[in-house]
Amino acid sequence: MKFFFDSANHRDIRDIWDKLKPLCDRSCVAGITTNPKAMAKIEAFKYNEWLNATKQLLGTLAEIRGDNKGTVFVQMPSSKMTPKEFLQFVAMFKRDIGKDADVGQLGFKVPPYPLFLREVSDMAEDPKALNLNVTGVADHCTALTCLDFPVRYVSIIPGRMNTAGIDADVSANYINVAGGNKSLDRVITGSMRDLAGLSSMIKFGTVPTIGTSMFNELIVTNKNNIKYFINMWNTKNNNPQEIKVSPTITTANQQLSRDFFVEMDTQCPDLVTFLLKWIGDVQIYEN
């Protein structure tokens, strides 16, 4: 059993964990994922506000897990940043988080653009140390391609896919079968909208990210749902059936991914303007 909290609100995460911990081992919490929209929800629009929110999340995660092995993922504020600008942002953000906040691992969410990933891998001194999580993926082909890069996770967005009329189960099942060891424990599923969708993604061997509204449905609406949530991992498919032909990918998949980043890129425009003004002098490999 393994999952991520999908929220930038450390208070909500603490409240949810208080209800979960009697039935769930703390090591099951892999970490916390955020994005610009989640930051905007807690009114973190500026650089220092992102820093403070991230420090609070790192502290919260360390308290929940009782160690420093969990990961808090911060999404790059704009998908239009160049590889160099992104690496400068990483160096600046890590520097300003400070060693006093070394209570967990920091990771970064990036778009699923092959050229971007290749250039970041070539420019970075140690690509794996960046702890990258490729997000906004709306099809199995892109997911499998991104897994070939030195990234920690690839995140598909099944909740948004199903809402757009795209069968997320088909993609998740194909990734599970075709990815093999390459995809084992490396595929995250986010934007979960209902219990059935969450259960399906767990069955296909992915690591779900679960937001406040989903946890409210699990915990607040019906307390018996907590046990149902824990038992979901018993449905994991350890013997997937062979799929001979790749499922069809249409322009709907591509547009959904594009729309995802358009939405994220517009959440914190002042932060993006600030970063592009100040990161120019930041050394990529600054410690």
Image (cartoon, grey):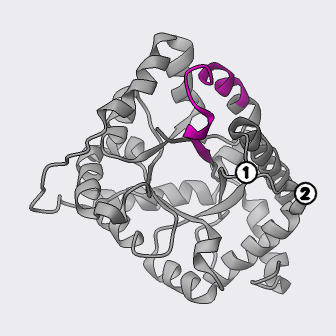
Span shown in magenta: 14-31
In the picture of the structure, the residue carrying the numbered disc 1 is: 68
Q: Check the image and report above or below for 43 versus 138.
A: above
Front position in the image: 216 or 184: 184
In the picture of the structure, the residue carrying the numbered disc 2 is: 100
Q: Report the number of numbered marks.
A: 2
Q: Amino acid at mark 2?
A: Asp
| Point 67% across, 52% down: residue | 69
Verify whether residue 28 appears in magenta: yes
The image shows residue 137 at horizontal and vertical percentages of 41, 59
Front position in the image: 262 or 12: 12
Q: Amino acid at mark 1?
A: Asn
Q: Quadrant of residue 11?
A: top right
| Point 65% across, 50% down: residue | 70
Secondary structure of the residue carrying tag 1 is loop
Quarter of the image for the C terminus: give it.
bottom right
Q: Quadrant of residue 63?
A: top right
> Is the Cβ of the residue at disc 2 closer than 8 Å to that at disc 1?
no
